[in-house]
Amino acid sequence: NAGVTQTPKFRILKIGQSMTLQCAQDMNHNYMYWYRQDPGMGLKLIYYSVGAGITDKGEVPNGYNVSRSTTEDFPLRLELAAPSQTSVYFCASSYEARTSGFREQYFGPGTRLTVT
Amino acid sequence: GQSLEQPSEVTAVEGAIVQINCTYQTSGFYGLSWYQQHDGGAPTFLSYNALDGLEETGRFSSFLSRSDSYGYLLLQELQMKDSASYFCAVSNQGGKLIFGQGTELSVKP
């Protein structure tokens, strides 16, 4: 199993450009998440999905959009990139544990994005 | 709202024991998780507590007190490779994780 994969690894965008960060998992997890991590900080949840066709906002959704058409893929779209979106973006997935709420999240290697 | 507090950095020597504390304020609390992150790489799961008490996994243990909204991660027999950032995170009914800002652990020889 490849686990959680993300592309690209690095990207430099100009202000106002758009791009899609790709995320895929091969563990048949229902739950998928997008986080951003600024230097020296924790991870902030951008969007998450509990299954194909279902998405919801996290803590910092402004400036981003997501879709979930399949169980495997969860792309993150940046429209009109701004310098404030310079960050490292991590995708994660997890299975559902109905009783304990325990959902170990498996993270991808991250995409390092710079907006100038 | 939801918030977590943990120390920003901790230093310890090889072979020692170190404890990283985490206090939280949240609604709909299900459990407290701990993640390790080396040099900005992918965070990896260490442990999870849903109930009060201590969970032990090898050299790492994690503790939770739900009444005090408090938990800690205990690392024993510290090794140089344990130098990393450690994050506590609370999970709620929606399956979301809210992360603390992380504790950078430096292990000295």
Image: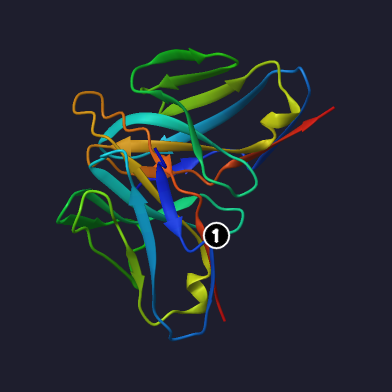
- Name the foreground residue: B20 vs A111: A111
Give the crowd class for mark 1: few <14, some 14-19, many >=20 residues within 10 Å.
some
Q: Quadrant of residue A17?
A: bottom left
Q: Quadrant of residue B80?
A: top right
Number of on-image labels = 1
Pick out the residue farthest to the left. Answer: A53
Above or below residue B51? Residue B11 is below
Give the residue drawn at x 46%, y 41%: B4
Q: Where is residue A47 drawn, in percent x and y?
A: 30, 57
Pick out the residue farthest to the front. Answer: A1
Q: Chain of mark 1?
A: A
Q: Amino acid at mark 1?
A: Asp
- Please, which colouring scheme is shown? rainbow
Badge 1 element: loop
Give the residue drawn at x 56%, y 53%: A41
Above or below residue B91? Residue A75 is below
Relative side of A116 to B88, left or right: right
Quarter occupied by the C terminus of chain B: top right
Relative side of A53 to A19, left or right: left
- Name the foreground residue: A109 vs A78: A109
Give the residue drawn at x 14%, y 56%: A53
Q: Where is residue B16 drawn, in percent x and y?
A: 74, 18
Q: Where is residue A7 drawn, in percent x and y?
A: 45, 61
Label 1, on which residue?
A38
Relative side of B103 to A107, left or right: right
Above or below residue B68? Residue A85 is below
- Name the foreground residue: A83 vs B81: B81
Q: Where is residue B97 drawn, in percent x and y?
A: 36, 42
Pick out the residue farthest to the right. Answer: B109
